[in-house]
Amino acid sequence: MKINAMHKWAVTLMLSLAITGCAQQGLYGTSYSRDQVGRAQSVEYGNVVSVTPVTIEGRTDGVVGSGTGAVVGGIAGSQIGGGSGRSLATVVGAVAGGLAGQRIEQAATKRQGQEITIRLDSGRLVSVVQEVEEGRFFYAGDRVRVLGQGRGLKVTY
């Protein structure tokens, strides 16, 4: 398989985009999306009852991993054979590359999480799953703030 300078440049660009695209917003208590900024949130206080380590699955809905993989796979496949064989190799390379790219994105976006069960001062018991921030877990007995409303809760100190 012979790859010319243009193909090397394209592969390098696509891999760079894939790595950049795999970055995702933090899922911990101190991270906010742009649309959350400036919105009022309810604040309740409580004590952590228990903490369970969990895994937050990686994204499989992103187009960066599968798209980049398909382009790279298609370029690699196009270097094989000639005529209709080359066309088939290009399609097979694109499909295989897309699947591989999706798996890479899923692995790159997997996060360490924690399920935090809290008894609020009101007596209500809530459980929130969020990403572990910088290796710091909450612990039973910690006094915490619970921010948000309904389904969008965050736990902070």
Image (cartoon, grey):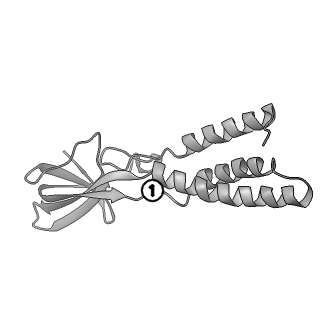
Q: Give the quarter of the image for residue 16.
A: top right
Location of the N terminus by quadrant is: top right
The residue that mark 1 highlights is: 58
Does 68 sit above or below residue 134? below
Q: Horizontal and vertical percent for residue 116?
A: 21, 58
Q: Is residue 156 visible?
A: yes
Left/right placement of residue 115 relative to residue 55 reads: left
The residue at the far top in this view is: 5
Location of the C terminus by quadrant is: top left
Of 15 and 155, nearer the camera is: 15
Q: Give the quarter of the image for residue 154.
A: bottom left
Q: What residue lies at 55% left-to-right and 41% top-to-bottom?
A: 19
The residue at the far left in this view is: 141
Q: Horizontal and vertical percent for residue 84?
A: 90, 61
Of 139 and 128, nearer the camera is: 139
Left/right placement of residue 124 relative to residue 10 reads: left
Of 117 and 70, nearer the camera is: 70
Q: Horizontal and vertical percent for residue 137?
A: 20, 47
Q: Amino acid at mark 1?
A: Gly
The residue at the far right in this view is: 83
Does 150 sit above or below residue 136? below
Disc 1 packing (10 Å; few <14; some 14–19; many ≥20): some
Give the structural element (helix, strand or loop) at label 1. Answer: loop
Left/right placement of residue 13 relative to residue 34 reads: right
Left/right placement of residue 45 relative to residue 31 reads: left
Q: What residue lies at 59% left-to-right and 51% top-to-bottom?
A: 65
Q: What residue lies at 47% left-to-right and 48% top-to-bottom?
A: 108
Of 35 and 81, nearer the camera is: 81
Question: How many discs appear?
Answer: 1
Q: What residue lies at 41% left-to-right and 59% top-to-bottom?
A: 57
Q: Is residue 41 visible?
A: no
